[in-house]
Image (cartoon, rainbow, N blue to C red):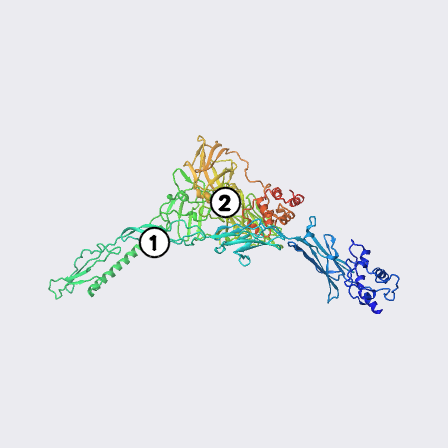
Amino acid sequence: MARMRETVVEHWPVFALAPTGPPAQSNEALASLPHLPFTRRCHSTLQLLLACSDDLSPAPPAPAAPSSTSAIRPAFARAGLLPESSDYSEVLPDSFPSAPAEPLPEFQSEPEDAFIVKNRPVKLSCKAAPATQIYFKCNGEWVNQNDHVTKESLDQITGLVVREVDISVSRTQVEELFGLEDYWCQCVAWSSAGTTKSRRAYVRIAYLRKNFEQEPLGREVHLEQEVLLQCRPPEGIPPAEVDWLKNEELIDPALDSNFLVTIDHDLIIKQARLSDTANYTCVARNVVAKRRSSTATLIVYVSGGWSSWTEWSECNAKCGRGWQRRTRSCTNPAPLNGGAFCEGLAFQRVTCTTLCPVDGGWTEWAKWSACGTECTHWRSRECQAPPPRNGGRHCSGSMMESKNCTEGLCARNKKISVEHASHPLDSGMGVAVYAGLVGALLLCVILVLCVGLLAYRRNRRHVQGDITDSSSALTAAFHPGNYKPPRQDNPHLLHPSAPPDLTATAGTFRGPLFSLQQSTLDSHHKIPMTTSPLLDPLPSLKIKVYNSSTMSSLELPSGPGSTDGEILSLKTVGTGPQNHHGHTLPREPGYSASATLGCLGGRLTIPNTGVSLLVPAGTIPQGKFYEMYLIINKWEKTTLPSEGSQTVLSPVVSCGPSGMLLSRPVVLTLPHCAQLEPPDWTLTLKTQTHQGAWEEVLTVGEESLSSPCYMQVEEQSCHILMEQLGTYGLVGQSAPPQPACKRLQLALFAPRAPCLSLDYSLRVYCIHDTPHALKEVLEMERSLGGVLLEDPKPLLFKDSYHNLRLSIHDIPHSHWRSKLLAKYQEIPFYHIWSGSQRPLYCTFSLERGSLAVSQLSCKVCVRQVEGEGQIFQLHTDIQETLPPHSPLPTAGTCLPSSQVGPYAFRLPASIRQKICASLDAPSARGCDWRLLAHSLGFDRYLNYFATKPSPTGVLLDLWEACHQGDADLVSLATALEEMGKSEVLVVMTTDGDC
């Protein structure tokens, strides 16, 4: 009986600790023991109590454990194990000890997401401790008990019961589920302390379609060209992973940095090499299958290049006219893989003339010398009739001969012949020859000293230089022939064939004289113009011209009656230009902007110039602040050089501080004067190095992955995404076959009324069609006392090498007289096309008959020779004070010079973040940031944006810069609506001002 009691107590926790079952099942049914199967059948009560050592395994959870035998007896009786009328109080105790308190179940492993491949079911498992029971619930319904496979073990460390349960999910079960939600399962574990639920595990049917959405295409590319092979894998669950094969070998970008696989699975070859000629295959795979795209054959070809020319061969004619030949080969490099062969001739032939050889001939014999002490006299001849030339033979025979001069009276009467260069002279004759040479040498030294003394005296007398008329000197840059030629005996003066180069010096001017530039006169009917007024009265001054290797100066000393406007001083020390990088950049009012910016970003704008710098939020690291500046460089400070046929199209702008580390690109906006329709331009962005040299940064249309910038070119301005601050400018040149056109403005100025003199002048400026250029001219004329007569007129100036011609017509000759001596004036083509000159203008000087004349009406015609033109119809009263007129916007309408933080941006940060979150991730349908770039017109080179962490954010920064003046959200909302991003439109409608 004691053993029986012990056994019951040992096996009771199977019933006593059973937790409350699922609410969908009846507690009474779960508690009835006939429904509880046993793992081993016991045939009698005695076997159950004494020998049955197996645990009971109830299928569903049982109700809470009874606290005494009164609850267990009816259950044993219904099970047929105890008679209902029997009293087994001696066998079963009245109460049982309660189990110690258990913690909540804790999952040691939870079910994981799984994919059904074909028809193979998947197994979900979970393990928890301590756990009395564990059941699965799938899609809100309990899984049948018979579908569970339970394993039970004991944790050797904690002594807790560990249960592990597995179920199988078939394809049929998943397919029978209706609704939008995927099939899911979840584990629920019980203990005496309560229940614990695991994470949901989703079961999906895996598949991978056969056809690729886009397959790579074979192509032929030039050596070092960037290559893009596109691949869009088939649709599948789970999404396919993409690998690239090169000749059936896996491409690993980590091992070869020349390869780059984008987030869209495209393969980019940064610079094509000969070794990259291969077959490329895109392989897509997931748990279901592996798909291979069609093979794309990439051929990297090399176009041939000529080697250097060989030296000219010898002339093939030994005498007279012949030919010389030189060759080159198409081996630098040789054409490969179908590359183009070299264009041009592989040889060149020129005529040559070989001088014929001339044999030498003897001159006549000289007279006999005096009779010597040895009773002989001598005579000589030379091989100079003719001398041997061009390899001709030398004279043969003796050069000197001697004979007895006493007719036999002396003992020596032998005739001696001295062979040329073989018989030495005797000692007496040698002394005479040497004495003569010494005398001649002394005579030469005396003559040289005399000539040097005379030259020294003449140099001292003329060291003060030549005197020339002042009007000729000041116009020498335009009339080179007016300079008096210097004396030929004074090497320190200017060379007579070369006019003085006044353009090589940096000038400081006062009054109406602005610059001196060299030009030439082609005809007496035209006057080449510069930036200085023509025919202004000059004082009767004398100009002294000095020239040396270290200093060149041109000075007009002020005398009685001279004013500051008549003083000119040009001085240049040394020969090299000064490096402006060694000095602080000047920040002039109206041409600079600055602000202290932090991580919230901001915008710098120079009013009425079209120049701005957008610093997006996050560009500056958190916690750091920088004093950022934006400066338009003056012409005399920083000049952007134009090489060959290039022309400067924008102002030169410095932004800084230079060397500042940026976390994301900033946007620099520059106005330009290029006429983009039709697109006949090759536009290049240049930057200035710390040494002062200019380097090319980017050419539009030739971008690559190594390009540090991206430039968005619009009709009036360009927007540059850059990550390095510095000094930048835009240049361009014509793209054949059509010549390009640049936009100019023509502005007509006159003196401010009232005019108290008989002289009256009209100035016509020819400047770039940019706000900055017009602002500079207006300020310069304001300082000169000029006034703008009417709005500037546009003019398209074509790259045709034709000058700009200006003329004045229909002057009322009864009251006015023109001082212009020619029919028209011209500004040279290169001065305008280079764009590196100061503002160019022409002056028309007029004279009225009397002070009573106040009305002036005339026409001023400006046109390019064989090109377009404009006409100013002038009707003005020179005594009437005109109201101030300026085409620039007033201070109330222009943007502030600096905006800091969120106020600088039109797009709120919350809308911006949601747009980026919606479009940054690539979409198989292409409805992502790439479609946004196409809708906004920023899709010229998408690879620049693809390399950024947030392509959408960079696109929105560029949109902010392009719409800083009219940045309403309508254009952006329209683009998102076309893309079908309705959820983003809802956010913009509620949070924005759309």
Check disc 2 and report the residue beneath it: 649
Q: Are marks 1 and 2 in contact (CB under 8 Å)?
A: no
Q: Position of residue 783 (x, y in %)?
A: 51, 42
Q: Residues within 10 Å of mark 1 (few under 14, many from 20)?
A: some
Question: Is 150 displayed left or right of 555 in the figure?
Answer: right
Q: CA distance from mark 1 to mark 2?
A: 45 Å
Q: Earlier in the sequence, mark 1 or mark 2?
A: 1
Please name the residue that numbered disc 1 is placed on: 312
Total tally of numbered discs in the picture: 2
**Residue 63 is at least partly visible in this image:** no
Q: Position of residue 316 (x, y in %)?
A: 30, 53
- Residue 264 rendering spot, x and y as whole percentages: 58, 51
Give the left or right position of residue 89, taking residue 161 as reference. Answer: right
Left or right, residue 196 beside residue 95: left
The local crowd at label 2, few if under 14, some if 14 to 19, many if 20 or more residues have their Cα within 10 Å, is: many
In the image, 448 versus 704, the foreground residue is 704
Q: Amino acid at mark 1?
A: Trp
